[in-house]
Structures are given as structure tokens and as C-alpha cells.
Amino acid sequence: MQNWHIDYHTPTRGLGFAVSEHLYRETSPYQSIDIVRSPDLGEVMLLDDVLMVSSVDEYVYHEMLSQPSLFCHPHPERVLIIGGGDCGTLTRVLLHKQVKQVIQVEIDEMVTRVAKQYFPQLTACLSDPRAELIFADGIEYLRNNHNSFDLILIDSTDPVGPAAGLFRKEFFADCHRALKDDGMLCIQSESPWIPDLLDLITEVNCDLRALFGNVFPYLAAIQTYQAGLWMFQLASKRYSPLEQSVLMKIDADAMNFRYYNAEIHRAAFALPQFIKERLS
Amino acid sequence: MQNWHIDYHTPTRGLGFAVSEHLYRETSPYQSIDIVRSPDLGEVMLLDDVLMVSSVDEYVYHEMLSQPSLFCHPHPERVLIIGGGDCGTLTRVLLHKQVKQVIQVEIDEMVTRVAKQYFPQLTACLSDPRAELIFADGIEYLRNNHNSFDLILIDSTDPVGPAAGLFRKEFFADCHRALKDDGMLCIQSESPWIPDLLDLITEVNCDLRALFGNVFPYLAAIQTYQAGLWMFQLASKRYSPLEQSVLMKIDADAMNFRYYNAEIHRAAFALPQFIKERLS
């Protein structure tokens, strides 16, 4: 029998997958990292035993975290990524020629170093002169920032351990202050199918609404994350992602997207009735 | 340690969940049935060890198989369900007052009998005088039918064993002949995330297009099915589900839907880029 890994979604359910090879293991001051190979999921990165990146479907999460806000903002020139050490989000931000500078603040240099070895397709973008990597605590970094970004993307791990603070109201207030008057924030906010996480989604939604006024939750089907459905929340000071003019700009063919396109952009903001009722 | 069940999606991946109680087991001439209780998924029905129904999310599959075509067809009076022994689809069809008769042809009476005991919320609808149950082979039943249904819903198990014939071109041709001149067919067609199943989806799409001309594939997020994303295909002789007039009719509150609503109806037909390219 092959070795199996269970990626726990709750203590009593999870995604099980065969592991054909255990390629790497290391522990940093923040977390453990494992790289394994799976027949179904390709190369997989686990942080503290939780699946973060798989080579077969990393594009869904990374396209969907980055593209809706990038296409919505009319001039996304200065972008900040908090977390995102694997550089999959950074890769997709840099696809936009309008972007002049991307600062990525990742707390754990180990993640980027190991991604360079096992996910070189994601880290190749680091040679782009517009990309600047800072290995530091994103929360501390943002405390000293005022009115300087067009877009902030929060590309964090689950809300435990080093990432817990990235889901708190105080941090969102720092993000709000660090954004320009027409800035936008997009945060990954976990799976609505897991009851505890739906509570978190609701809390994040309330906190962002109190600060930004306009919050647009949206969904993507991510087979390797908890229960296969993932929520993002786009908080905006001015622009709406639902304008027809935004849809007109999206050319999925030209940018080689594999999940995102104009129809998906619009559709992602439609919420199943149970989520709509919960967030209303 | 608790007892776990792995619902295999391929030989090397699957959904694992704890089983707190094994409530029932029986074997019919067609398949085995197990009813188990899970902390996360509630009561679960397994057919040949594959998860078919869970009490926590059965509504997603059943609403999404039935409602898009029921709202699209202007007068869905005579409806045929092939399979559907748990009666979850039948329950949702009968929500529509316009429906005058629903014939359900299920090959295995064991499924309905066991559903009556463990999923009474799904079988309560059997007291509705508009519902007629026939325990027979759906393929044989349809061979003798001409021009008699407004809507056919194919609510089958996976395309192996007794359900394999329900994914074949010859069967679709029988469905086409059994439908009225403005009839519609909707079939569950598995998960696009599993490569072999994406091949099946593509084949079903080609076969339906050859017969019906208009085929509208659509998606729903079903956490308990393979890889969490499920495809349905709506083949139509005349009507389009994308008309604004269809959306105007959908009142999710009035019908107590938990997943489906007007926004989800429209959004479900948006396909991720990799599926769009594959089906084009």
C-alpha cells in the first residue's frame, strides 16, 4: 500500500491522497514545510501539514486572488502582497503591464527559498525588476504605511499560527490606511462549507464592511483546499468589480489564464443562497 | 481512533471522513447500499462504497440538477426522472406547481426503500399524487416512448455498473425522441477536476450537441462529490436558460432554496477557462 497523506479540513474529515515521494522537509521558526509528490496533485507544498500549493491546480487560487481586483482597479500601479511566499500570486500580478511595483512581505524566507527549488515556475518572476521581496512581519510592515498602495492582496495561510493576525480588524484598519483613496484590498477568506470557517468569513465581512463600505465576496472552486470551495473578499474604497467596463477589459486568452475569464469574473460574485443569507 | 471511510475519487485520492455509526447494509442484484453517520456529513448513503447522498449537502446536487431546467421551461408539466431513487430530485421537482406529473424510473427499489427509512425528508414527497414511481430499467422504459415529456432529468450514479448505459449516445437519442418538440434534458455529468471524467464530460457534450444542437453545461460546488465541483449538462430543443425572462421568475426565498437562486442560475453557466477551451 502506498503512503497516504490526509489533509485535515476538520478533525473528522479531509482530503486523502497518495504520496509517491517525500522530497523535502524543514522547520523554520514559524512552521514546518514538506514537499511531496502525489500521482494526482503533482508536487505539493505542505505548511504545518496543511496543503498550500499543488502543481496541478495552484493556478486557480493564484489567478482568483489576484485578477478580479487587478482588472477592477483602473490603474493598479503599486501593489502590496502580504504573505504569498511561494510567489504564485506575485507571478500573476506581474502579468499586468500597468503594475509598476509589487512589494511582497512574507514572514518566512524558508517558503520562498524552498519554492525556488520545487516550484521554479512560480518563482521565475523574481527576476522582474518590478518585484521587491521583504522577509518581515506583514502586520508590523503595514503599521508604518500611509496612503501608498493601490492594491493590497492578503495571501495568507489558514487563520492559526503566524497568519492569525491577518484576519483581525486592527490589521484591516492598517490596510485601509495604507491604501490610497481609491485603493482596494483582497483577502483569501477560507471555505464556506466548513461551519467554523463560515463564521470567520462572516466576521471578516462585517469588519471589512465597517471600514470600507463596499465589500464584494466571491468564490472559486479549488479542489485541493478545504471542501473544494474557497471564498475571497474584495474590499474597495471606490471601484466596483461588477461594472460592465471591467468585464470588457478581461482577455483570458491573451494572458493564458486557465481558470479566470470574463464570465468567471462575473459569476464568482454570485453567492449560493445559504451564504447570501448569512452575509446579508 | 475513529473508523474512517475513504470515498475514492481516483485510486490515489479521495474524501476521508470519520464514521461514528454504521447504520445499515444491504446488497441488491444491482449494488450494495450502506448508511453511515458522520460527524461532518450527517447521514450518508453509499452505493457500492461511493458517496451518493449526505444529509448536510444533498440540497446542492438536487436543487442544481432540477431547478435550472424547471425555471427555463415555460410549462414543465410532464417530467421524467431516470434514477433518483433517494427522491431528493423528485422532492425539488414537485415544488413547481406547474408540474402535473412526474414519473420516476429507478432500477433498484432497495434505494428508495432504504431512503424512506434514513432520509424521510426526501421521500415524504411520495404522498404527492403527481408522483409515480416505476422500478424498472430506465433505458428499456425510454425505448417505448415518443414525444411525451417536457423534461427528462438523468439522476444517475457514476458511469460504471448499472448506470453506464445512461451516458451513451443511444440512450440520449431515446431521450430526444421521448421529449416533446420543445423538450429539455438535464444530466449529471461528473467532476471536471478528474481527468478521466473531463473526458467523459467532453464526450457527453459532443453526443448531446449532435442530437439537440443547444447544450448548456453548468457547474455547482458539491463538497461531498469528487473534487468538490460538479458538472451538469442541459440539452434543449428550443429554450435557452440564459434568457433574462428565466432569471426574473426565480424566487429563491419563496421556494426555500439553500443553494440555488437567480444569481447562481446565471453564474452556474460560466465555465472556467480550461473547461471552456476543452468543450469549444
Image (cartoon, coloured by chain):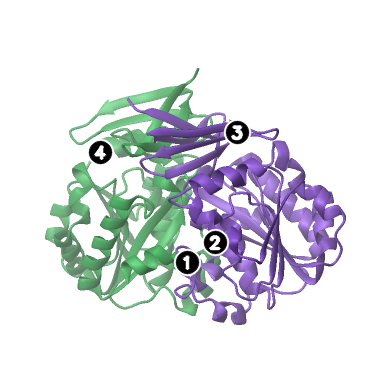
Chain colours: A green, B purple
Tell me the residue that label 1 is attached to: B257
What chain does badge 1 belong to?
B
- Location of residue B271 in the rendering, given as x and y in whole percent from the top left corner: 58, 60
Q: Which amino acid does label 2 sit on?
A: Glu
Which one is earlier in the sequence, the residue at label 1 or at label 3? 3
Which one is earlier in the sequence, the residue at label 2 or at label 3? 3
In the image, is B117 to the left or to the right of A125? right
Tell me the residue that label 2 is attached to: B63
- For the question of whether residue A213 can be seen, the reply is yes
In the image, is A230 to the left or to the right of B161? left
Q: Which amino acid does label 1 sit on?
A: Phe
On-image quarter of the C terminus of chain B: bottom right
Pointers 1 and 2 in contact (CB under 8 A)? Answer: yes
Which is closer to the viewer, label 2 or label 4?
2
Q: In which quarter of the image is residue B50?
A: top right
For mark 4, does the 10 Å Cα neighbourhood hold few (<14), some (14 to 19), or many (20 or more) residues? some
- For the question of whether residue A116 can be seen, the reply is no
Q: Residue A128 carries which label?
A: none
Q: Which amino acid does label 3 sit on?
A: Asp
In the image, is A65 to the left or to the right of A237? right
Pointers 1 and 2 within a single chain: yes
Pointers 2 and 3 in contact (CB under 8 A)? Answer: no
Tell me the residue that label 4 is attached to: A109
Pointers 4 and 1 within a single chain: no
Question: SS for tag 2?
Answer: helix
